[in-house]
Each structure stands twice: as structure tokens, then as C-alpha cells.
Image (cartoon, grey):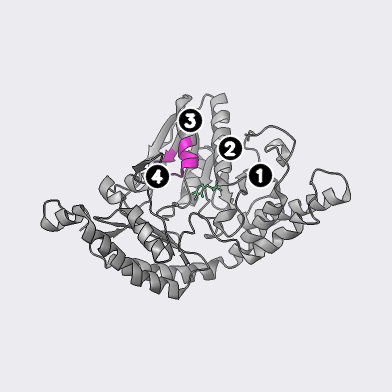
Amino acid sequence: MIYADNAATTKMSRTAIDAMLPYLENGFGNPSSLHTIGQRAAEALSQARATIAHCLGCRPDELYFTSGGSEADNQALLSAARAGRARGHTHIISTAFEHHAVLHTLKKLEAEGFQLTLLDVHEDGLITPEQVAQALRPDTCLVTIMYANNEIGTIQPIPEIGALCKEHKVPFHTDAVQAVGHLPIHVKEQNIDMLSLSAHKFHGPKGVGVLYARKGLPLYPLIEGGAQERGKRAGTENLPGIVSMAAALEESCAQMEAEAQRLSALQTQLIDGLSAIPHAALNGHRTRRLPGNVSFCFEGIEGESLLLLLDDRGICASSGSACTSGSLDPSHVLLAIGRPHEVAHGSLRLSLSRHNTQEEVDAMLRDIPPVIQQLRDMSPVWRDLQKGVRSYVIQ
Ligand SMILES: *Cc1c(COP(=O)(O)O)cnc(C)c1O
């Protein structure tokens, strides 16, 4: 099997598994306990926090452990909104192609009276600092813009947007779930006030993540209970997960540069190879994207059928579109970059990781084009396009 769906989740690394095991066994203590076993757990928790702080360029007491990226996004947005409302500031700036953990939280805030400006995403999958500058208002209480998009991989100009927010004294949050462990991140140098990350996107375990919040920013708990995480996140800490996440992040950061180079080379081959298919278009900017991300739209096919046929050939991939309650909605990301509905349905995302090899890329380049042809041969839409009854959207 070829696993090319690393934007959905990654395989845990040996390092991450080994780091976790002692805390499932004798290191099972509760970090809040005063006895020796508890204090050993507290020491491991503190070590993990220091490691992650070092990787992100912040202080350990600016990190809050969560159950993952979604929780971190929710807490960041709801905290900034609450602090904003207390000062009469109820305007929020974001983009149309955020992850649903951000978009759905924003919709909830909008229903509660906040005003949203969702910036239009350029057809290359990028937004500009100028767009943010134009959207800023005296009552803006939050700017939240994802670091790298999970479907099309495009990387936003985060340090520049952060500098702008700093200048206007508006808190800046970034959902960096796809970026952490894959791109160099330094929250202070990049002017980031709040950042969300998730361990399972960089070969750590599922169900654990981090919210970084700059010292001094108001943060409110989503979950009430004990005084863990300095009163901002109640509940006994997921110590095996947290220790494992720290080990996975340290490992990813150590091999980041070499891995990015290797993946970029494989990415280029995939992009060049798939671009040769007639009426195919790359989604997102060609170079300003995550090194492992390849996203295409193919005219005249259904992404879901493509995935099933690829799965038969041992290729695990993803399409942009998500099945929502039985109805097939095309991906909001592809619509945001201006792909029409019928084209957005014919999408394919390949996301590579350190486990993918040259041989796998060769196999994908051999197997994907004939499968697309097979689907087109069966498609009434493709027949109409060929006959000229319909015109091609992708030339
Ligand atoms: C995966 C992902 C999330 C959600 O993280 P979980 O840990 O699965 O909750 C949020 N944002 C982006 C961009 C993601 O890719």
C-alpha cells in the first residue's frame, strides 16, 4: 500500500512510540500528585513543555496542552472574541478557506453578533498582507489566518501579516496544524500571538495538541475543572501523548530541512507528471506550498470514484471534497480559489511524508493517468466535452 494521505494523519514514528511507552507503564503517575510517582510525571510534563517551547521559539509557560488542533483553534478564537467583546470590539478577520475548526467557530461567533470579514483567496491559493490591511477596523478584535492550507498546501505570508497586526495591536492567531514540524516556525520572529498545532500531523499520536498564546493575552478555558495548564485547560494531562508529541516534534524539526528538500523533488515529479494529463490543473501556487502537497483538479471525473479506483490499486489518497450528511458538497477550499462546482468535484490530493519513496512516486505516476482515462471513458460529461456540447473549464 502507498499511503499518500499525510495531510489527514501521519503514521507515528518509532521515536514517538518509544517515548510514549514508559508513561503507559511505570510512569503512569498524575502530575498533580505530590508523591514520587506523581512528581516524576510532573517532571516529564515539564520536560515536554520545554522541548516544544524550544521548537516554537517561545516560553514554556506560553503553551497549553489540548486534545488536538480543533480544540486549540476553538479556544484561541473564543478567547479573543470574549476579550474583544468586553472592550466593544466585535470584528474578526479570517479567510474563506480555513479549516472547519476555525470556520465553524467563526460562524458560531457571527450568530452571537460578531462581524466577520472572510478575505477572498486569490486563485493561486494565497492572500496578501494588503488584503488584511484593508480589512482592519478600529473594532477588529482578532485576525486568524491559517499558516498552510490542508487541501492545497499553500503557505501564507504569516510573518508579514503578523507584523501588520502587531502594528495595529490586534491579536493574530494562526492555525499552523499543517505547518508545524514541516516548515520553520518561530512565533516571536514571525509575530504570532496565538498558534494551534496537532501531534498527529507530524508523526505523533492522535488526540493531543498545543495552543501557544503569547504571555499577557487573555485566555479563557473551554473546559472547567481542576487547575491544570495554569487554570486554562482542566483535566488530567494526557502525559503519554504529550511526551510522545514532544519527541515527534523534536525529531521532525531535526530532519525538517533535509526532508523538505527530498519531498520537494518528489513533489515536482508528481506535479510535472500529472500536469501532462489533458485538462488537468494544479490547485494552488506551484512553489509556495508545503513540500509534500500535490493537489489537482481533473475535468470530467468524480473525485470519489477516482479515490476508490486508486484504493483498488493500493494508493491511499484523498479528494478535496468532503461528504457532508449524505450530500456531496464540493470542497469549500476549491470553491474559494474559484474552481467551479463541476471541476471542484474532480479533485485529488496526494500528501507525502518521510515514509514515501521514489519508487512510490514512480508507481503513482504510472497508475494515476490510466485510472483517470478509465473514468473519463465512462463519463457522460467527458463525452459532452469531447463532442463540444459543453466547453472545457480547464484548458
Ligand atoms: C488536522 C487539522 C486540524 C484539526 O486537528 P485535530 O488534531 O485533528 O483536531 C485543524 N486545522 C488544520 C489545518 C488541520 O489540518
Question: Residue 183: x and y, percent?
Answer: 52, 59
Judging by the rendered image, the residue that carries numbered circle 2 is 75
Q: Earlier in the sequence, mark 2 or mark 3?
A: 2
Q: Is residue 81 left or right of residue 129?
A: right
| Element at label 1 | strand
How packed mark 3 is, by other alpha carbons closer than 10 Å (few <14, some 14-19, many 20 or more), is: few
Q: Earlier in the sequence, mark 4 or mark 1?
A: 1
Q: Are marks 2 and 1 in contact (CB under 8 Å)?
A: yes
How far separated are the C-alphas under marks 2 and 1?
A: 10 Å
Amino acid type at image mark 4: Cys
Residue 349: image quadrant is: bottom left
| Element at label 2 | helix
Q: Nearer the viewer, mark 3 or mark 1?
A: 3
Q: Earlier in the sequence, mark 4 or mark 3?
A: 3
Question: Residue 376: x and y, percent?
Answer: 23, 59
How far separated are the C-alphas under marks 4 and 3?
A: 21 Å
Question: Residue 285: x and y, percent?
Answer: 36, 57
| Element at label 4 | strand
Q: Are marks 2 and 3 in contact (CB under 8 Å)?
A: no
Q: Nearer the viewer, mark 4 or mark 3?
A: 4
- Check residue 323 in the rendering and tell me which mark sits there, or answer none: 4
Judging by the rendered image, the residue that carries numbered circle 3 is 108
Give the residues in magenta: 94-104
Judging by the rendered image, the residue that carries numbered circle 1 is 64
